[in-house]
Image (cartoon, rainbow, N blue to C red):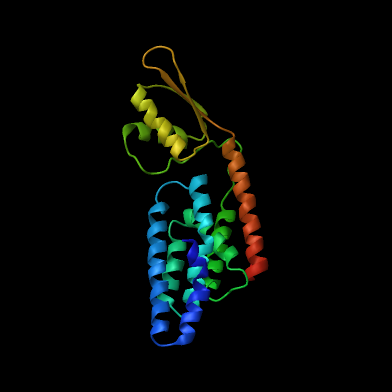
Amino acid sequence: MDWFEDLPRLCAALSAEGGASTAAARRIIEVSWTMFAGQVTPALDGPLTSRREAWLTALGAPCSGIIAAAAGLGLTGVLNNAHKLTRTAADRTHALAMATLRAAGTRRAGFDELALNCADRIRALLAQPQRAPGDLSIELPTGCACELCERLGAFLRAPERRGVDWPLAKDRRRHVHARIDEAELPVHHETRRQGRPYTLVLTKSEALFERERLAHERHQADLAWLTDEWKVSI
């Protein structure tokens, strides 16, 4: 999708010729957006892991190219769909939206609404109460409703519980391991190989607090950048 970054220049050159060339440019933009959304939308299900966030961030430049090209030809349908996508699953599309704005450079047409939406989202996040020092609650992402995940979720949500010893057979331990690792939850897990079945030992990590501190600082920095570069009101 790297070539999407060059869409503004390509489509501007085509539209300058008028007639069928302009129609071709519009069609190229529409097809490009369909391809882009088709790649991104399925990735918005599930937890926002570091790998997924990095991937979405890398799509900022292609997304910026499509939006700039659509704004240049007045394709409001594409622009509306782009803004709608970045409002869907807001916590997961925030990385994409911010990367798109950063890749826009000095271009402003087509991006103002996106900047306002990002600023509003960040303000809402910053307005949320900060985690209490002793609150160890963690939300298990959706994806499985089996009895193992129900029990795992209950342990994770309990703010006062730091650890649990859980005798489980190998396949059942593997499932719990997978849920924790796939979501990159701040939970240490190891198997105590004594007795039968072996015991899965889960311990919530202090990384929970560090992650939230870093996220808070990142949101503050993003809002300051939006205020400075995009003149959104504080």
Q: Nearer the viewer, residue 85 or 56?
A: 56
Query: Could you tell me which quadrant the C terminus lies in?
Result: bottom right
Q: Quadrant of residue 127?
A: bottom right
* Residue drawn at 50 percent across, 26 percent down: 163
Instruction: Provide residue 216's location: percent of width, then percent of height.
Output: 61, 50
Determine whether 148 is above or below 37 in the image: above
Asked if residue 147 shows in the view, the reply is: yes
Asked if residue 233 shows in the view, the reply is: no
Instruction: Provide residue 211's location: percent of width, then percent of height.
Output: 59, 42
Instruction: Provide residue 133's location: percent of width, then percent of height.
Output: 61, 37
* Residue drawn at 65 percent across, 68 percent down: 229
Instruction: Provide residue 91's location: percent of width, then percent of height.
Output: 49, 54
Give the farthest residue toward the left.
146
Determine whether 75 is above or below 42 in the image: below
231 to the left or right of 57:
right
Q: Nearer the viewer, residue 95 or 203?
A: 95
Q: Nearer the viewer, residue 66 or 217?
A: 66
200 to the left or right of 216:
left
Q: Nearer the viewer, residue 56 or 213?
A: 56
Count the labels in the image.
0
* Residue drawn at 66 percent across, 61 percent down: 224
